[in-house]
Amino acid sequence: MKLLARRLRPWLRQTVKAAVGLIYPPGCACCRAEIMPPDDALLLCDLCRKRLTPKSRQTCGRCGASLAGGPTAAIACPHCRGLKFRFEKVVALGSYHAELRDAVLRVKRPGADPLAAALGQLLVDTQRDRLVALGTDVVMPVPMHWRRQLARGTNGPELIAAAIANRLGNLRLRRGLVRCRNTSRQTDVPADQRAANVRSAFRIVGGWNPAGSRVLLIDDILTTGATADEAAGALMTGGAAEVSVAVIARADSPDVHF
């Protein structure tokens, strides 16, 4: 009897879940429109999926910025030419503009947890091949200082990171970095001073040893790359084999406002 109950439990759980979904259809995480429970568990209506999924674009594999000169432009990307980063690659869902910009801004406010998770899932669904090619074994959010998280009431990068780790096949989600200084917001600092603003702002915590790990750092937006670079530097100093970055939006100009 107990064996039968164990075997029936998953089926009953799935049946109840389906029934609840029919009686109380879930809402789109972006526009709140009622939708039927999707087979892929991505709580976005068809219209929002199209709006948030960028059109095909040429990007720099190193910094993730949009390029206008075809494949050869990646050799001399105007956004990162002459810059040294401690991360290897950037994978972004799209550019920081229009609907994607609005979605990223909403993720920074309380009450947008479902949207944060949906954006992480959508990033994997649209960029799966590039993400899998990174050979990641650890997914890690760029940490937020506890005071800022308390003031903001949410932690978008952590929610996005959890969704990405799960969507990529239950990869390890680590919170192995802490932001040990409550730095000024990067958008409040001139672009040429942002590296100094976040210098030594991260350290490894929790007794975790990153030696040999291939880490995928997660953030909601990347502008100059200074924050991701400093976080990657802390991981590389700790012995990580390689660090790459995945973001929802890549700003093609540092002059953005959150």
Image: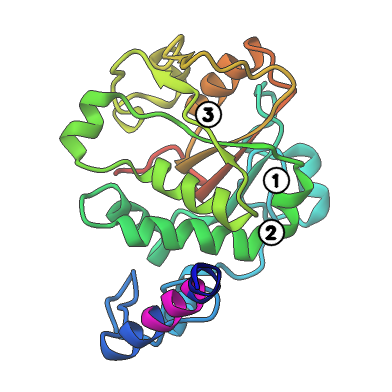
Q: Of 63 and 43, which appears nearest the observer? A: 43
Q: What residue lies at 55% left-to-right and 68% top-to-bottom?
A: 3
How far across and how far down the image is residue 7, in percent? 55, 72
Q: Identify the amino acid type marked 2.
A: Arg
| Residue 214 sits in quarter | top right
The magenta stretch is 9-16
Quarter that holds the C terminus = top left
What residue would you read off at disc 1? Answer: 60
What residue would you read off at disc 3? Answer: 228
How far across and how far down the image is residue 234, in percent? 56, 15
Please name the colour scheme applied to the rendered image: rainbow
| Residue 244 sits in quarter | top right
Q: Identify the amino acid type marked 1.
A: Cys
* Position of 93 relative to 140 (above/below): below
Is residue 12 shown in magenta? yes
What residue would you read off at disc 2? Answer: 128
Query: Which of label 3 and label 1 is nearer to you?
Result: 3
Q: CA distance from mark 3 to mark 1?
A: 16 Å
Q: What residue lies at 41% left-to-right and 14% top-to-bottom?
A: 201
Residue 185 visible somewhere in the drawing: yes
* Position of 236 relative to 154 (above/below): above
Q: Residue furthest front?
A: 1
- How many residues crowd around disc 1 within 10 Å: few (fewer than 14), some, or many (20 or more)? many
Query: Which of label 2 and label 3 is nearer to you?
Result: 2
The residue tagged with tag 2: helix, strand or loop?
Answer: helix
The residue tagged with tag 3: helix, strand or loop?
Answer: helix
Q: Identify the amino acid type marked 3.
A: Ala
Q: CA distance from mark 1 to mark 2?
A: 17 Å
Q: Of 190 and 185, which appears nearest the observer? A: 185
